[in-house]
Amino acid sequence: MEWGTELWDQYDIIEKHTQSGLELVEKYVKFVKERTEIEQNYAKQLRNLSKKYNVKRSGKDEPDCRLSSYQAFLDVLNEMNDYAGQRELIAENMMMNICIDLTKYLQEIKLERKTYLMEAKKAQQNLETTYKQLDSSKKRFEREWREAERAAQYAEKTDQDINATKADVEKAKQQAHMRAHVAEDCKNDYAAQLQKYNKEQNNFYFNEMPLIFNKLQDLDERRVRKLGQGYILFSDTEKQVMPIIGKCLEGITKAGTSVNERNDSMVIIEQNKSGFERPGDVDFEDFSQAINRASSDTSLSTPKGPMDLLAKNKGKNFWLFSKRSKPTVTEDFTHLPPEQRRKKLQHKLDEISKELQKEVDQSEALGKMKDVYEKNPQMGDPASLASQITQTTQNIERFRAELGKYEIWLAEAGGRGDTLRYKSHAFNNNGSHDIHSPDGAHSDESTPDTSQAIYAEFDDDFEDEELAAPIGTCTAMYNFPGASEGTISMQEGEELEVVEGDKGDGWTRVRRNNGDEGYIPTSYATITMFK
C-alpha cells in the first residue's frame, strides 16, 4: 500500500508525521550522546579510582611489592583501568557509529523532505493559479452573458417602441449583437479554462501528489530502517567489547586466586629476618660482693665491682616494642641487620656484574668493529672508535673496582659471594682482578688493550660453549671476506643460521651447517627471526 493512493488527501497528516519522525531521530541522537557522556564520566571515575589507589612505589625494593596480596591488588587496579578503557571505547564507538552517522543522515533526509514539500507546494500553487484563471473566465462569461441578455431585451423593447426611430432600433440591435458576440467569446474562453483546470487537477491528484507522497513514504521508511539499525548498534557496540570486559573480569578473578597467604608469610620472613640471635639470660649481678671482697673471686663468676657488673650487660637489652630511630644509610649497608645486609650486598654485586658484562660486550663489539675498519678502510675509520673504546675501558675498570669492593664487604658479612659473573674470565684479561683488593687494582704486567684482550677471551669462550639453538636465518646479500678475528666469511646467496641478534653495534652472530660461527655485518644479509 502506498501513501499516494491511500492518503492522497492527507497532505497535512503526512507532513506532520514525517516531521515527527525527524524529531524522533533527533531525540534518539540526543539520548545516545547523553549515554556516551555517562560512559565517559564512568570511565573517568574508574580511572581516577584506580589511580588513587595505585600508589606509585619508589622501586622494587619496597617491602610490599613481593607480596601476592599486594600484587593481586595492583592487578585488580590494572584490570579496572583496562575495564575503564573499554567503557571509553563504548562511548567512542557510539558517538562515531550512531551519533555522528545519524546526525549526518538526519541532515540529508531533512533536505530531501524539504525538497519534496517544496515540490508539493509548487504543484498546489500551479493548480491554484489555474483555478483562479478558471474562476476569472467564469465570472467574465457570467457578466458578459447578462450584459448580452440585457442588450437583447433592450433591442427588442426598442423595436416595439412606436416612438423609437429606425436609427435607435438599428443601434440597439447592433449593441445586442456585439454583446452576444462578446459573451460567446467569454463562453469559449471559460470552456477552455475549465478544460485546462480539469486536466491540471487530474494530473495533480493522480500523478504529481501521489508521486510526491510516495517519495515521502520511501524517505520515511528509510528513516525508520536507519533508526532501527541505530537501535541495534546501541546494543552491538557494547556486545563487541563484552569479550574484552569479560577478560578484565577474569583477570580480577585470576588476581584473587593468585593470592598465596603462605608465600606472603615467607616473603615477610625473607625481607625482615635480621639474623640476630635471641637474647640470652640476664646474668645475676651480686652487689653484695662489693661489701664482702674477701669472698672467693670465682663465686658465681661475678665481676669485682658494681660498675663492672653494669658494664658487662650494657646494651644487651632487646625490646621488641621499643621505638627505634631510623639508622643512617651507609654504602656498605652496615646499618642493616646481618641477614638483610648480606642480601643487599649480594643484590648490589649482581647489578654491578650485569653492568660490567654490558661494558665487556660493548668492548668486544668495538674491538671487532675496529679490526674490520683496519682491514676494510672503506667501511669506516678506526680512529673514530678511539673515544668509545677509551670510555668503555674506563667503565670496565670502574665496575671492576666496585665489584671488588662489594665482594670484600660481602665476605665480611659472611656471604658466599655468588655474584652473576657473566663470562667472568674476561674480567681478568686487562689486569688481574683480586677480590681481596678493595679498589680492584691490578698489576702493570698485563696492560694490553682491554677491548682486544676481552675480544680474544670471548672467542675462546665461544668455542667452549655448547651450540646455542638458532633464533633465525639469514641470506647473504653481498660477499664478506671475514678476514678479521671473530668474523666469518660468507658468499652472496649463502644461507646461515642466526644464533645472536644485533645488539645495536651493527654485527650479527651466525653459524654454518658445519658448526663454524662468527660475526657478519648486519647490513650484509637479509635476516628472518623465528617467532
Image (cartoon, helix red, strand yellow):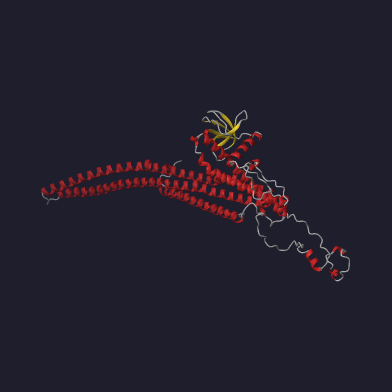
Is 5 in front, or is 237?
237
Point 27% across, 44% down: residue: 190
Q: Which residue occupies 20% across, 45% down?
A: 182
> Looking at the image, is 294 positioned above or below residue 50?
below
Task: Please state which of residues 345 and 18 is positioned toward the viewer in this rendering.
Answer: 345
Can you give x and y, in whole percent of width and height, for residue 88 in the image?
A: 54, 50
Nearer to us in this view, 446 or 231:
446
Q: Quadrant of the C terminus?
A: top right
Can residue 28 be seen here? The reply is yes
Residue 397 point in image, percent of width and height: 61, 46
**Which residue reaches farthest bottom?**
291
Q: Whole-percent x and y of residue 347?
A: 67, 49
Against 497, is 405 above or below? below
Which image quadrant for residue 368?
A: top right
> Taking 202 as reference, is 514 left or right?
right
Q: Residue furthest right?
A: 295
- Find residue 494 and report its horizontal and vertical position in percent: 55, 28
